Amino acid sequence: MNATGIIVEYNPFHNGHLHHIKQSRNLTDADIVIAVMSGHFLQRGEPSFADKWLRTEMALQNGADIVVELPYAFATAPAVDFAKGGVALLAALKCRALAFGSEQGQIEPFLATYDAIEGDNATFQKNVQHAVKSGLSYPKALNSAYSQMTTKNNGSFADLTQPNNILGYHYVEQIFKQKSAMQAVTIPRIASGYHDHILAGTTIQSATGIREAVFDGSLQDVEAFMPASNFSLLQQATLMNWDVLYPTLRYMLLRLSPSEIAAHAEVTEGIEYLLQKAARTSDTFTQFMTRIKSKRYTWTRLQRMLTHIYTGFTKAQLIEASMPHYIRLLGMTENGQRYISAHKKEFTLPLVSRVAAFDDPMLSQDCKATDLYYLAQQRAPGEDFRRPPIRI
Amino acid sequence: MNATGIIVEYNPFHNGHLHHIKQSRNLTDADIVIAVMSGHFLQRGEPSFADKWLRTEMALQNGADIVVELPYAFATAPAVDFAKGGVALLAALKCRALAFGSEQGQIEPFLATYDAIEGDNATFQKNVQHAVKSGLSYPKALNSAYSQMTTKNNGSFADLTQPNNILGYHYVEQIFKQKSAMQAVTIPRIASGYHDHILAGTTIQSATGIREAVFDGSLQDVEAFMPASNFSLLQQATLMNWDVLYPTLRYMLLRLSPSEIAAHAEVTEGIEYLLQKAARTSDTFTQFMTRIKSKRYTWTRLQRMLTHIYTGFTKAQLIEASMPHYIRLLGMTENGQRYISAHKKEFTLPLVSRVAAFDDPMLSQDCKATDLYYLAQQRAPGEDFRRPPIRI
């Protein structure tokens, strides 16, 4: 059986994702689509809008055959490590292709960009150093260095100022670095609001747009942007954002000492004092973010620090999390189950269906993140221990 | 001016306390009554029922001339350290007497008990060791050892199975150990429900009974048990108990690692695993306590551990807090202010009226405890920095 992998957040699943799954399957002639999905905390340093089990169900009902969890350590990491974890899991699951959406829409520019950067890595690193010294944040410095090496040949390199292109580039990079046999494939991303003739009668809206509409109280308005089954799942969901977590984050920032705050992943350079000061005076998350935002750090970077403080994820844990230790199965279709039965012996990482049966600090952090997410919604912890993979 | 000291919690202030202040003043012929009062966390390991500022106002309106705060490190400690901090502050404030309520009601048995125990400390320590080995908790072992040395002479020793006698004994002990010139005086405690002829027309109810009635929704029922001015203050108060703090405590117990939990004051002997397990399965504080309670630990001891986990107070901080570093002024009457002006130069610890002007880790913990108490009520932190002492 021929499996194609995708790396997703589904926050929440919408028509654009449906299009992406269909195209991935068609373009790679896949029997199986395997989604590596983030759990309850995401790459932009945010809690997921809806529960990971609900998002798993959404994916399985709309074209994914297997959903596995991207461990917390990778799901909440900068693009390079996010990609590293996702690619490693898909490779371990013996996918033949990795399909990603991108603004670029063609794979060749990504390959050319990789060759250009790896072909003269010394110059690239020098450009990064130079950009950091000139005052850019590290992600911006990376982008600037990429741009300098890839703008001369107009159109033949990927435009790395576009967010999906950046992720795509890192997927390609990781496929090479991990010496994986997977083929990289890209699908043109359909812009928000674009009325797609491939999916007649459906409308694309970004996940951000959907979340904003729901939090503004317009749940009905988003019905057009997602498959009907997902909409009914979303109607039952307890939704989450940073506003819900903020009272507990605030408690945490005032309870911990500055050095305890500084021990968390991505917290650097004395920002712990600013975090405490802002927590003292800010009654809402928006106020708080406004007070800590500066040129030095991106909004995303700040939110990732806060995610790690909320879930208690330290620099020491980050260092130990260099590669995934396991494949955590969240759900599967009957088709997915057949693939697992047929190929399980080839998988290069242990497949975990029952958390209690696999003792590992990386997995403990995933379960802890779930517990602390649930507690903020007055739901009982321990869901990851009780719940078997979803089967549909 | 002749000052008498008292050590109190006022949780909340009631007619029994009014009686205690009046009698303390009369018996010692005092011009001034100085109350050392606990802040937001108390000796039984509980958050105070009402705000410390409100309790300060209650005290000043009913006979106390000066209220100073017993630092967190002592206010939440076992009786011996609670007494140590209180006695040290009253001595630093140049009180000539310390007056405490007791079941015993006479001071001689306390002095005789102290002489008996100190006169043969080797036997006493041996008795304690023996009781611990026989399986008693440390507080029970102390009591058992006291009893063995003081029961032979019926009536001439203090009955140390009574809670107020135990505190009283430790006050007397600390006066001797700190070589203080203060005179110890005791006032018979009036039992709950006793209709007191000294305070004609008033009724005594214990603070515990008052809190229970209020949380049962019967605020009006407690009006008879306290001065009228206090009742109107209490009607405006946001009330607190462990049920309010439990969701955050639960988050904390699931977020911290076992070794991080074990680093907190009074947490010993592997109980961190039991705390985590019980937090996982308990939706309410009562459920939680039922699951962690055993013969090994008193309810009070367990609650103190939880208080320290909630406020982030560690074993290391406890070790550093051997004696109070300052006198934190919470409020004063005009009379109290005159005493302070006249005697300030004789005080043996710095008098702190403005927290921002005194940088000290023990004081930081007091302010942090206030912040974390307020956050649980959705109130702004920083009150201890903004608020000057109350003057009435």
Image (cartoon, coloured by chain):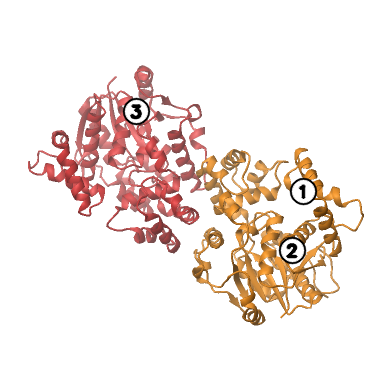
Chain colours: A orange, B red
| Residue behind mark 2 | A175
Which image quarter: residue A347? bottom right
Within 10 Å of the Cα at label 2, are there few (<14), some (14-19), or many (20+) other Cα atoms? many
Q: Which mark is residue A142?
A: 1
Quadrant containing the C terminus of chain A is bottom right
Residue B61 seen from this side? no
Question: Going 65% across and 54% down the picture, which residue do you hit?
Answer: A45
Residue B48 seen from this side? yes
First in residue order: circle 1 vs circle 2: 1
Pointer 1 and pointer 2 on the same chain: yes
Q: Is residue A281 left or right of residue B153?
A: right
Q: Secondary structure at mark 1?
A: helix
Label 3 and label 2: CA atoms lie apart by 76 Å
Quadrant containing the N terminus of chain A is bottom right
What is the chain letter for disc 3? B
Amino acid of disc 2: Ile
What is the chain letter for disc 2? A
